[in-house]
Amino acid sequence: MSNSKEGTFCPDGYRALSTAELRELLQSDDKMDQIIRLNEKFQELQVDREMLLTSNRSLAEESLAQRPCLNNGKLQLAEKYKELSNLITTCWEKQSQLVQVCRNEKARFLPQLQASDGSWVEC
């Protein structure tokens, strides 16, 4: 058998062999053992490939099934951030108002307190 066809052990590769090359191949125990080992390895790889494809498909389907929940969660999170922003703005406004009230009251009562004992607690 020629060297160029020696490594070709796939089923379609046998079509390219002549009858004499096929007879020689069948009579060589070493080559037949190699073909069998390669064929078994190929079948194992095919099974592994099918298992990986099945697993990948399952994971993809699970991922797609969870997408609506994820999108809904993103919308809820955006809404919560908007609420938080509004609360922060409200807190800053109330704090500002409180500081202003404190200043007004300080200005109103400071002369009376200075006249009485001179102590004052800062706001």
Image: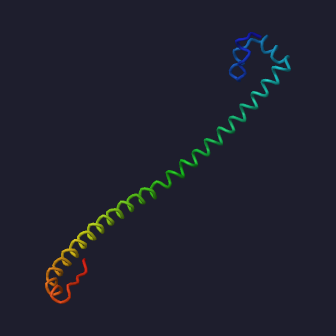
Q: Position of residue 26 (x, y in %)?
A: 83, 18
Residue drawn at (30%, 67%), measured in percent from left and top?
Answer: 88
Query: Left of 84 or right of it: where is 40?
Result: right
- Displayed quadrant of residue 109: bottom left
Q: Position of residue 69 (x, y in %)?
A: 46, 58
Q: Quadrant of the N terminus?
A: top right
Query: Which residue occupies the foreground of this view, 77 or 100?
Result: 100
Residue drawn at (22%, 74%), measured in percent from left and top?
Answer: 99
Q: Residue furthest bottom?
A: 116
Query: Left of 21 or right of it: where is 60?
Result: left
Note whether 119 is above or below 63 in the view shown: below
Query: Left of 113 or right of it: where is 56?
Result: right
- Displayed quadrant of residue 3: top right
Q: Position of residue 46 (x, y in %)?
A: 68, 35
Q: Position of residue 85 (x, y in %)?
A: 30, 64
Query: Which residue occupies the foreground of this view, 64 or 117?
Result: 117
Residue drawn at (69%, 38%), measured in percent from left and top?
Answer: 47
Note whether 2 is above or below 29 in the view shown: above
- Displayed quadrant of residue 21: top right
Query: Which residue occupies the foreground of this view, 76 or 17?
Result: 76
Count how many numbered circles sit on residues in the image.
Answer: 0
Query: Which residue occupies the foreground of this view, 80 or 66?
Result: 80
Query: Left of 14 or right of it: where is 24?
Result: right
User: Which color scheme did the rendering employ for the protein?
Assistant: rainbow
Q: Quadrant of the C terminus?
A: bottom left
